[in-house]
Image (cartoon, rainbow, N blue to C red):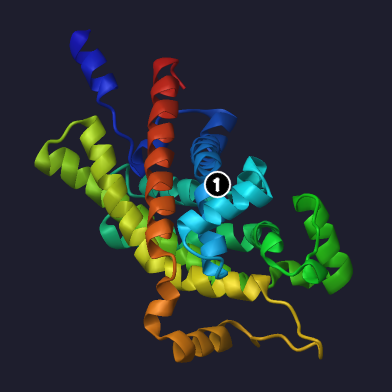
Amino acid sequence: SKERDRERDSYIPTMADQTAKSSGVWLTVKPFVNGGTSGMLATCVIQPIDMIKVRIQLGQGSATQVTKTMLAAEGVGAFYKVSFTFIDFAKTILTAKAIAANDGKPLPLYQKALCGLTAGAIGASVGSPADLALIRMQADATLPAAQRRHYKNAFHALSKIISDEGFLAMWKGAGPTVVRAMALNMGMLASYDQSVEFFRDSVGLGEASTVVGASAVSGFFAAACSLPFDYVKTQIQKMQPDATGKYPYTGSLDCAMKTLKAGGPFKFYTGFPVYCVRIAPHVMMTWIFLNQIQKVQKTIGL
């Protein structure tokens, strides 16, 4: 009994744990519930840092300057204007199905990377309209008064985008959004599971040390892989036409080339420290929340 309690208390989830025995409808929805819930809880905690990151990318100053300006001009509520997460659903279910097809064994690194790439593409394609609304609402306060869109909420933003720019405009910037999500998920998912296995099985670390160490590794790789695409995505989604109706960029490639020419390769890593601070804790809290959710489910037999 004591040994069972120790095993339960030291339980550290990897994506393989999503294949715990279950039945009926719950077997199908469990990965969505676990991955989605843990991801959304983590996003709610990290949202203020994401707001600051976007403002830095839009040239509003350092993290300290942006924070002071937002608090003074918009109040605390400005840090929580909108928050969305879709990719955790796809990431969790795809990896669970892959592990099931592999007879429950841990996946090799390349398969974890492929699951992250595929899940990122699916989740970002579905969530691109919400991400567009998020970026525009975050950037609105940085625009001159005459150019502000004054979106009241995410639904108002999406309805205005459709009425003013057409239905397909909701997927403006979808290309870099999808590529960014693929890069982020590949780095995050593959490195996290691999790090958990290494720290827990090879090094012999305890639960807390394993989660912290694996999350730090995962967060760094996720940030390093995805920030250039995140920068291009932000520029494309927040751009507005000039007086002649011409946009500053014709597309993602044009944006990338102009950015490279104007600021060099390191321009794509504008705001990297803040981005890393935003990604790493998000990864950490996602897995901590998932760990606790799965512990509760295991306790009550789900």
Q: Residue at x 47, y 62 (%)?
A: 62
Q: Secondary structure at mark 1?
A: helix
Residue 107 shows up from this direction: no
Q: Quadrant of residue 178?
A: bottom right
Note whether 192 is above or below 237 in the view shown: above
Q: Quadrant of the N terminus?
A: top left
x%, y% of residue 94?
47, 51
The amino acid sitting under disc 1 is: Gln
x%, y% of residue 43?
53, 44
The residue sitting at the left extreme is 203
Residue 185 appears left or right of 195: right
Note whether 213 is above or below 163 in the view shown: above
x%, y% of residue 86?
58, 50
Q: Quadrant of residue 141?
A: bottom right
Q: Nearer the viewer, residue 112 or 191?
A: 191
Residue at numbered disc 1: 47
Q: Quadrant of residue 76?
A: top right
Q: Nearer the viewer, residue 121 or 135?
A: 135
